[in-house]
């Protein structure tokens, strides 16, 4: 039973990484057409509406069972906290993509796989030595995969935004690990997108007044509709819900490595879409191999679910250990 639950968690996190990775291209394309806060508000709104539909469908299909599972307090509080962290992370990433090279931005974003275990160490609940080695190997692989010498090695203002985004995503992962185990997965995810949509909507004016984007209009929506729908349904509504559910089944440090494969999927999808301009070099191929090997090895060292990576609370002591 534990093995089946663990494997299902791995599959969920791999699917989430796939959707995030394939959305990276759509996200970069959207930043050429509309402001970061506008894009975040629209995709989050679509994600929230989609999950509301899922909840309504669940109610129709299981009338004899409770509509929501777990603690409602943890669900609502987790949705607000995770939604705020998601608002900060996604908009910092969107802003960074305005001026940062996509490959370098992908590498910097992937540094959350390093930040989460570090936070765990300082909280007294860090990962095993094997996982720490796997994290370092993965960071090396991401560097080889995404950094090109011609892009330089300094940090621009845009790249600093992406670095802050990686820190925010680290906190989002930790919050999902804390609240997701005791709350209703779908409802928590819906609340977080509703919060992200509202907060992003409040700051839409910054797209025009500060970042000098044109005012959103039907023409812009027509040009970017595919990116908005794909990011809203699959990357937001589906992938982030899979993340919360998957983190219930897989230890946080290992889950982070699985989710970090989004960068690998982004490179592969870019190559499939435009093979001539996105062909992998020998160094990038070695980087892909290092990432794949480190993720596989990390999954061999977790026979059971561990505690929250950054905190120990009374709620976590009563967590799910099925």
Image: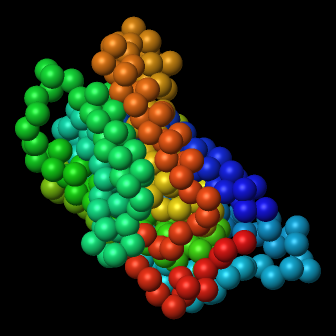
Give the image location of residue 110, x and y in percent.
34, 45
Give the image location of residue 240, x and y in percent.
54, 57
Along the line of sight, the residue nearer the viewer: 107 or 297: 297
For image coordinates 15% across by 22% down, the residue present is: 149
User: Residue 232, can we see it?
Assistant: no
Instruction: Using residue 27 as the reference point, say whether residue 182 is left or right of it.
Output: right
In the displayed structure, 152 sits above or below 135; it is: above
User: Residue 69, can we see it?
Assistant: yes
Q: Quadrant of residue 138?
A: top left
For image coordinates 88% across by 72% down, the residue present is: 62
Q: Quadrant of residue 248?
A: bottom right
In the displayed structure, 22 sits above or below 303; it is: above
Quarter of the image where the C terminus is located: bottom right
Quarter of the image where the N terminus is located: bottom right
Along the line of sight, the residue nearer the viewer: 210 or 86: 86
For image coordinates 16% across by 45% down, the residue present is: 158
Along the line of sight, the residue nearer the viewer: 273 or 289: 289
Along the line of sight, the residue nearer the viewer: 250 or 273: 250
Give the image location of residue 48, x and y in percent.
57, 64
Give the image location of residue 280, x and y in percent.
37, 16
């Amino acid at each position: 039973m534990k093995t089946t639950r663990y494997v299902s968690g791995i599959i969920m996190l791999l699917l989430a990484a796939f959707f995030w990775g394939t959305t990276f291209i759509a996200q970069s394309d959207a930043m050429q057409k509309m402001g970061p806060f506008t894009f975040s508000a629209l995709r989050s709104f679509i994600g929230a509406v989609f999950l509301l539909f899922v909840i309504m469908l669940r109610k129709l299909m299981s009338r004899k069972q409770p509509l929501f599972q777990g603690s409602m307090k943890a669900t609502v509080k987790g949705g607000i906290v995770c939604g705020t962290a998601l608002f900060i992370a996604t908009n910092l990433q969107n802003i960074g993509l305005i001026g940062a090279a996509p490959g370098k931005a992908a590498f910097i974003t992937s540094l959350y796989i390093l930040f989460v275990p570090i936070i765990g160490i300082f909280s007294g609940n860090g990962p095993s030595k094997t996982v720490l080695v796997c994290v370092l190997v993965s960071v090396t692989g991401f560097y080889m995969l995404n950094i090109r010498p011609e892009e330089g090695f300094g940090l621009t203002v845009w790249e600093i935004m992406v670095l802050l985004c990686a820190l925010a995503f680290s906190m989002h992962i930790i919050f999902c690990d804390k609240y997701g185990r005791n709350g209703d997965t779908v409802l928590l995810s819906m609340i977080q997108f509703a919060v992200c949509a509202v907060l992003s909507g409040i700051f839409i004016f910054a797209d025009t007044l500060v970042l000098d984007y044109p005012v959103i209009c039907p023409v812009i929506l027509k040009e970017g509709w595919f990116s908005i729908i794909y990011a809203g349904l699959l990357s937001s509504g589906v992938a982030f819900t899979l993340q919360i559910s998957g983190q219930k089944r897989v230890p946080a440090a290992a889950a982070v490595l699985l989710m970090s494969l989004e960068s690998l999927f982004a490179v592969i999808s870019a190559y499939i879409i435009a093979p001539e301009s996105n062909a992998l070099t020998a160094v990038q191929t070695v980087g892909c191999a290092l990432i794949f090997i480190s993720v596989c090895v990390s999954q061999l060292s977790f026979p059971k679910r561990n505690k929250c990576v950054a905190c120990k609370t009374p709620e976590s002591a009563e967590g799910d250990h099925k």
